């Protein structure tokens, strides 16, 4: 079992109370109370931090006051104070420490933490916290250590190479932050024991081959069996994993995909 050296990075142990809230956890259930995502439930009680992904305070410099842990995300967050007195939580990039400043502006310099429209970001720059539609708030590239790269501008759209190796078109008026998300060591953590998964709200997963034929396509047999099928399937008979294409053929965003991701290369590189 391994952990992260939090003491080296974090500067506050308690969150800023006005930017926190409690709520009822979904634990994998939809509005009807039916389980739609399996293997979720219980886990340690968590206090929700209201993180600003909209970045609607433009042209006002902000200073980082704390670096904090957020139980709902893998990257570190920071409490920032804007020059007009407002305080917000934001997702911090790598290298940003207490006392550093950033600005959200169309004319912001290309420096880590600053936020500006994609059309104003030079080709080759690493970005995170990317909007899908202008003004909708950051949706893409928010997990620990991740970053995307601006690779082209064409016909009102910016081509972005995502962490998955997919190349995607995003409207040039969408905003993005410069840099890469903090806590890149998160991917090296070894959970180590089943109990720690339960603290995180992850319930046990049973292998398909250990189930009955009525419960899974791989189920049944007197002893250990191979799956007996040429291609991998989910419990519901849909294709899954190992390089098989699982994207919805008529997904609305297909028109924005310039180049599909290459899972085979990702597996070989170990990233």
Image (cartoon, grey):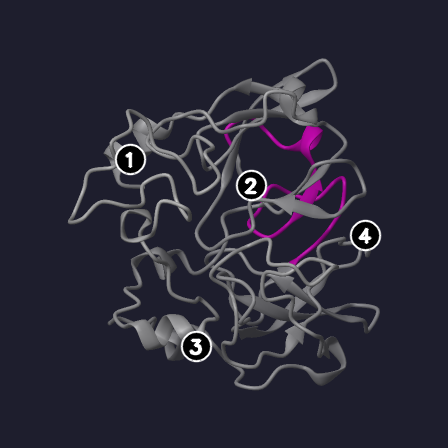
> Which of the two labelled residues, at mark 3 and mark 1, occupies the earlier sequence position?
3
Q: Nearer the viewer, mark 3 or mark 1?
A: 3
Dot 3: within a 10 Å radius of its alpha carbon, few (fewer than 14), some, or many (20 or more) residues?
some
- Are discs 2 and 1 less than 8 Å apart at CB? no
- Are discs 3 and 1 less than 8 Å apart at CB? no
Q: Nearer the viewer, mark 2 or mark 4?
A: 2
Q: Is residue 245 left or right of residue 137?
A: left
The residue beneath circle 3 is 199
Q: Is residue 154 left or right of residue 228?
A: right
Please provide percent x and percent y for residue 23: 71, 75
Q: How far apart are marks 2 and 1 (CA)?
A: 23 Å
| Residue shown at the point (22%, 45%) measured from the top left | 221
The C terminus appears in which quarter of the rendering?
Answer: top left
Q: Which mark is residue 267?
A: 1
Q: Nearer the viewer, mark 3 or mark 2?
A: 3
> Which of the two labelled residues, at mark 2 and mark 4, occupies the earlier sequence position?
4
> Which of the two labelled residues, at mark 3 and mark 4, occupies the earlier sequence position?
4
Q: Which mark is residue 58?
A: 4
- 167 to 8, vertically: above or below: above
Task: Characterize the magenta stretch by its predominant secondary structure.
Answer: loop
- Are discs 1 and 4 less than 8 Å apart at CB? no
The kind of secondary structure element at disc 4 is: loop
Q: Is residue 268 left or right of residue 88?
A: left
| Residue shown at the point (46%, 59%) measured from the top left | 95
């Amino acid at each position: 079992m391994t952990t992260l050296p939090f003491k080296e990075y974090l500067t506050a142990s308690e969150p800023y109370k006005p930017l926190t809230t409690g709520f009822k956890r979904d634990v994998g259930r939809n509005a009807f109370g039916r389980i739609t995502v399996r293997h979720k439930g219980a886990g340690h009680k968590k206090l929700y931090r209201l993180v600003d992904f909209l970045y609607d305070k433009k042209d006002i410099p902000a200073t980082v006051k704390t670096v904090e842990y957020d139980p709902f995300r893998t990257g570190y967050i920071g409490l920032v104070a804007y020059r007009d007195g407002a305080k917000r939580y934001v997702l911090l990039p790598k290298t940003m420490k207490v006392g550093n400043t950033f600005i959200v502006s169309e004319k912001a310099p290309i420096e880590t933490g600053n936020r500006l429209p994609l059309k104003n970001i030079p080709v080759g720059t690493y970005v995170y916290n990317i909007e899908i539609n202008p003004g909708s708030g950051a949706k893409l590239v928010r997990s620990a250590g991740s970053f995307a790269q601006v690779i082209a501008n064409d016909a009102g759209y910016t081509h972005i190479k995502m962490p998955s190796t997919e190349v995607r078109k995003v409207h040039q008026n969408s905003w993005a932050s410069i840099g890469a998300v903090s806590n890149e060591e998160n991917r090296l953590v070894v959970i180590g024991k089943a109990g720690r998964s339960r603290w995180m709200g992850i319930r046990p997963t049973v292998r398909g081959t250990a189930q009955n034929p009525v419960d899974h396509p791989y189920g049944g047999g007197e002893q250990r069996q191979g799956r007996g099928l040429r291609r991998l399937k989910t419990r519901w008979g849909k294709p899954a994993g190992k390089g098989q294409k699982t994207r919805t053929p008529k997904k609305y965003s297909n028109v924005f995909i310039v180049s599909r991701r290459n899972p085979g290369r990702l597996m070989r590189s170990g990233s």
